[in-house]
Image: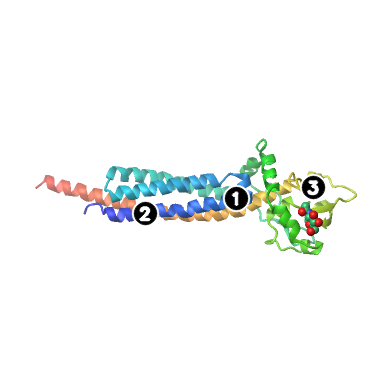
């Protein structure tokens, strides 16, 4: 049996098609306001997706045009890509461990602690100049304007369901509840007479450009937002990796079967 090139071409086309959800995941991440400000994960995901598309198409051409050398190069390249995708999927899973927020007394929404998130992610935010750039970017998004417009009364805000208020809004658009501020509008608060020592409480400002963007609670809210989005993208990466492994195994099997048959045929010819 010679190598069934048409079957291999079909397998490689599947590999190329698997790049579509990966690229889509990268593009989806870059459309999320918080990811667009942080700029960490979308580029590696998009780059891997494009590489996968290119390699899959090269593999398809190799099989379709019966170019064994290109097919061998394809098998090497796709194995490197599978390993890279698997590493990225595991890495993203590892850095997105953390809590899913804390209840606050007499509030329904959740608040977030920076200490709950991975050191690697926190270090990304704390690189010199990084947070200044990210918070300016966040302040330019409609996140807090939407937050201000959503709750008409204090009661509305205090009883907001956790899934209605994004972690980013909880952390950046209002002072942390422990500070004891009194609400006027969701983004306008009166400070208590005796201030708390917590730096977040002093960092709160009613000015639209400041709010709590300098608070640790804002970094925590951002990381919780990222965590949710990264986990979703990670699921796609993991599924694509598993499917690619299957495709890769089939490709290898077809290649080896053909090679073995070929050797066997030559061996027999040598004796006749
Ligand atoms: C928040 O909403 C109130 C009431 O609708 C409005 O008066 C105020 O200007 C808004 N603040 C910001 C910062 O948008």
Q: Quadrant of residue 157?
A: bottom right
Check disc 2 and report its element: helix, strand or loop: helix
| Residue linked to disc 3 | 207
Q: Residues within 10 Å of mark 1 (few under 14, many from 20)?
A: many
Residue 166: x %, y % from top left: 68, 56
Left or right: residue 101 compared with residue 268: right
Q: Residues within 10 Å of mark 2 (few under 14, many from 20)?
A: many
Left or right: residue 222 compared with residue 251: right
| Mark seen at residue 168 | none
Residue 270: x %, y % from top left: 12, 44
Residue under the image location 31 percent in, 43 percent down: 70
Looking at this rendering, what residue extends furthest in the right direction? 193
Q: Residues under labels 2 and 1: Cα distance?
A: 32 Å
Looking at the image, tell me whether mark 2 or mark 3 is earlier in sequence order: 2
Looking at the image, tell me whether mark 1 or mark 3 is earlier in sequence order: 1
| Residue linked to disc 2 | 13
């Amino acid at each position: 049996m010679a190598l069934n090139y048409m079957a291999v071409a079909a397998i490689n086309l599947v590999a190329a098609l698997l790049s579509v959800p990966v690229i889509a995941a990268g593009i989806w991440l870059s459309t999320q306001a918080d990811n667009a400000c942080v700029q960490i994960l979308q580029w590696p995901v998009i780059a891997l997706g494009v590489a996968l598309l290119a390699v899959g198409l090269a593999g398809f051409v190799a099989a379709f045009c019966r170019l064994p050398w290109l097919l061998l190069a394809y098998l090497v390249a796709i194995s490197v890509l599978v390993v890279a995708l698997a590493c990225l999927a595991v890495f993203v899973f590892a850095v997105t461990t953390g809590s899913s927020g804390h209840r606050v007394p007499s509030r329904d929404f959740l608040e977030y602690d920076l200490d709950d998130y991975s050191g690697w992610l926190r270090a990304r935010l704390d690189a010199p100049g990084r947070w200044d750039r990210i918070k300016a970017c966040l302040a330019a998004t409609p996140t807090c304007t939407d937050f201000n417009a959503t709750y008409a009364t204090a009661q509305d805000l205090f009883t907001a369901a956790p899934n209605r208020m994004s972690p980013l809004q909880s952390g950046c658009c209002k002072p942390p509840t422990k500070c004891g501020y009194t609400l006027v509008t969701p983004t306008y608060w009166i400070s208590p007479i005796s201030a708390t020592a917590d730096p977040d409480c002093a960092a709160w400002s009613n000015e639209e450009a400041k709010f709590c963007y300098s608070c640790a609670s804002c970094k925590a809210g951002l990381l919780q937002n990222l965590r949710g989005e990264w986990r979703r993208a990670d699921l796609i990466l993991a599924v694509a990796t598993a499917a690619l492994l299957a495709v890769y195994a089939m490709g290898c099997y077809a290649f080896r079967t053909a090679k073995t048959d070929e050797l066997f045929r030559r061996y027999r010819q040598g004796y006749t």
